[in-house]
Structures are given as C-alpha cells and as structure tokens.
Image (tube, coloured by chain):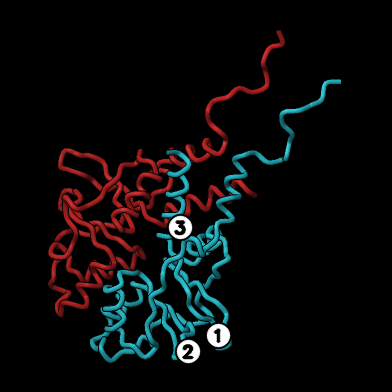
Chain colours: A cyan, B red
Amino acid sequence: ARPRVGYYFTGKTNDTQILEKIKKLSVEDFQSIPVVVDRNSSVYDAVCAMFLEDVGTLFVVDQNSVLVGVLSRKDLLRASIGSKDLQTLPVDIIMTRMPNITICYKEDSIFEVAKSLIEKQIDAVPVVRESPNGLEVVGRFTKTNFTRALVDIVQNKLY
Amino acid sequence: ARPRVGYYFTGKTNDTQILEKIKKLSVEDFQSIPVVVDRNSSVYDAVCAMFLEDVGTLFVVDQNSVLVGVLSRKDLLRASIGSKDLQTLPVDIIMTRMPNITICYKEDSIFEVAKSLIEKQIDAVPVVRESPNGLEVVGRFTKTNFTRALVDIVQNKLY
C-alpha cells in the first residue's frame, strides 16, 4: 500500500493555532510603566500627576511601595465635582481599595487580563509582584496595551 | 497522469485567513449607543451626563443633531480643576472641535479604527453618517468595543 504522507490530522486547524498563540501572549511583553502616588497625596496632586504623566489610572502606594489603592479618571472627576477642597482631601478617601482592586502578574495572558478589564468595567490593572510587605506595583496593563498588541499582530501578519 | 487533488496553494496560510477575517469585521457589529449633549450645555451638565450614562466620552451636537465636538473625561477633569464656575461654563469652550475630531463610519473595519484610536491617543470615536446638514452621530466605537470583540473571537474559537 502507498504510505499516507503529506499531512496528518492534529485535531486543530491553523486558525485555532494562531488564536492559541494570541491567548498565550503575556502581560510583561505589552505592559506600560506604572504611575504611582503616595497614599498621603491630595486629590489635587493626583490630578496633576495624571495630567503630567498622561495616564488614565494611578496606583496608590504606602511607604513600602506596596499597592493600597487605585484611582481612575472617573474617581478624580467625581471628587473634583463634589468637593471644594481638593488640596487637602487625601486620595486615601476616594480611592478603590483592597479587596476591590483587580491585579495581574507579568506571566498572565493578555487575553485573560483583557477579559477581566471588560468584566470589571475598568481601564487598567496594576501588574504586581509579591514582596514581604505585600503586593509591589511593577507595571500597568490597559485596554490601550491590549488594543495595540492586537493591532500589531494583525498588521505584522498581513504586511 | 494522476490528477493533483486534495489541496492547492493559494499563497495564504489559514493563519493569514483568520487575521484577514479579523481585519474585515466592521464597526456596526461592535459599536455602542452614542451619548450626546447639546452644544449649549454647561460643563457641569456634561459631567452629570457622563456619570449617569457611565461613558468615558460624550459627543456634542448642534440643534440639527450634527456633530460639533467631543468631550473626554480628561477634558472635563481639566475644566473641573481649572474653573470655579462649571454651571455656567459652556461645553463649547472646552470641547475638541472639527477638524480635530477623528470619526468613523459603520462600514469601517474595527482594526483600522483601533489603529487610529492608538495613533491619536483617544478612547473613542463617533460613528457618523452624512446628512444634508453635516455629520450625524449614529454610534460610538471605543477601545472597550475593540477589546470585547477580540476577546469574544478568541474565546468562541477556543471553547
């Protein structure tokens, strides 16, 4: 009998293969530098930091550089409208705090993190690393990072 | 001679085919409902609309429902910090206006629109349709829409 050569069935199409490749891309290859503020900062200082650094989300840290909170543009806009005294109002009062902070690790799949961005209706998550004092912020992963990653993949494959 | 059957070479792998499919997905299948404010609204009213509707970008229209401006959270946060009189400050003063507004049409590829979101460093674009009076706003396409679309594609293909 003629040997059956040329191809064999792996149970997966190439289509599935590229999607699996996308699923395995990890946060560390696409993350941005985190922008942090001290938990004793005022809301006014946080707004300034957001504009100076041009980010949509700030991470709040304690004296050991451990993550204690997250501030979105929405949080700061709400505070700016509602309060008269932004220079004395500490970010501590208005930030989202544990256990309500969604975090990720640099080894995580960008696809899984993108899923949680959508589910939690947030724009960014801190990339953290465990330290003796708690979770240390080492990066920032946003919808922009995910969008840029996918645009790059589609583009490089086609041109 | 034995006929050559079974496969022929199209010059494209299946990998390229799925990426081309992604490239052809159109805005109308993934867009959101637009949230608009009148050009005579105050900044205060715009901030309220942003919170009530829970969106990151508002589109400003004239009396004919024609697009005249765009307001981001960043625009409104800047105004809230810088001005004391948000109830009388009209959005007209602080909005981004033509020709600096990036627009798209419902037939556009989500990939091309995502590229311009990244390049222009914006979160959302209005989906418009031409009318006798100008560009009418019919939708909103955001980084969230793009992220959700890609997450859905990867997910549905794998499970």
Q: Are marks 2 and 3 on the same chain?
A: yes
Q: Which residue is mark 2?
A: A64
Q: Nearer the viewer, residue A128 or B109?
A: A128
Disc 1 and disc 2 on one polypeptide chain: yes
Q: Local crowd at mark 2 within 10 Å, few (<14), some, or many (≥20)?
A: few
On the image, the x and y values in percent for residue B46 come to: 24, 66
Number of numbered labels in the structure image? 3
Label 2 element class: loop
Left or right, A100 with reference to A88? right
Relative horizontal placement of residue B101, taking residue B145 as reference (left or right): left
Q: Is disc 1 on the same chain as disc 3? A: yes
Kind of residue at badge 2: Asn
The residue to which callout 3 is attached is A146
Between the C-alphas of marks 1 and 2, the distance is: 9 Å
Q: What residue do we see at 42% from left, 38% from top? A: A159
Report helix, strand or loop for mark 1: strand
Neighbour class for label 1 at 10 Å: few (<14), some, many (≥20)?
some
- In this view, B144 is above or below A3: below
Q: Which mark is residue A134?
A: 1
